[in-house]
Image: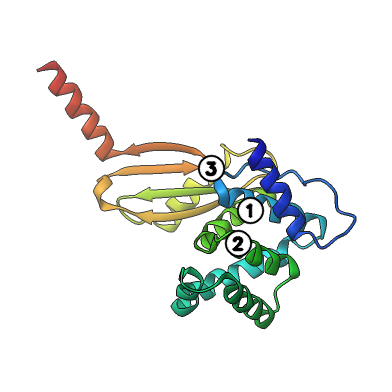
Amino acid sequence: MASASRNVWGVARRFSTSPSAAGLVKTPIAVYGTEGRYASALYSAASKNNALDAVEKDLSTIAGLLKTDPRLAEFLQDPSIKKSLKADGLTGVCDKLKTSELTKNLMLALGENNRFNAVQAVVNSFATLMSAHRGEVICSITTAKALDAAMSAEVTKALSGFLKEGQKALVSYSVDPSIIGGMVVSIGDKFVDMSMATKLTKYSEIIKSAA
């Protein structure tokens, strides 16, 4: 834990553009792993500099660019290319996109530590922090068939009963015929499987154990 903490502080100093900045801003929720440490340090620096929205927009743009330009992704992950060349390339990309210095420093920090393959994971972790910052709770609903508008509205209303004051549900719907019926629901870190497939499996196990 001590080494992880030192790593966060080092990254935060690398990101900070304010000479008077001191200490880390507490994140609204915890995010884990190496990508979580980078995202947390970036959140802290961006929060101090009132740049959370700008950085979020930058990261979304960079993530989109990595998906639409495979040559850039290959360039960053090619172990035969020197870190200095990658750093120059990243600086050029950030300058062209007119990103904030904080975003540029994130990319350079990832480069210094050979973490280019973690860019998308860091972007995802930062997005998770921003959702929590806005009071959003990620909810996903999986059903065997697509829900009509009336049913979707009813489900969304039901979800609100699980939220705390000030929170709002960010709901996504997906279809998976294999669950047969019912639905599978996740609300933040909570998961409820109310699918017919799971019930049938459970009933089958009960029958087998009684045989």
Residue 207 in view, yes or no: yes
Q: CA distance from mark 1 to mark 3?
A: 21 Å
| Tag 1 and tag 3, C-beta contact below 8 Å | no
Q: Quadrant of residue 18?
A: bottom right
| Tag 1 and tag 2, C-beta contact below 8 Å | yes
Amino acid type for the residue under numbered disc 2:
Leu
Nearer to us of marks 1 and 3 is 1
Residue positioned 75% across, 69% down in the render: 101
x and y, in percent, of residue 29 in the image? 65, 42
* Earlier residue among tags 2 and 3: 2
Q: Say left or right for 56 vs 82.
A: right
Q: Nearer the viewer, residue 1 or 67?
A: 1
Q: Is residue 105 above or below residue 88?
A: above
Q: Name the mark on residue 188.
A: 3
Q: Give the SS element for disc 2.
A: helix
x and y, in percent, of residue 83 in the image? 57, 70
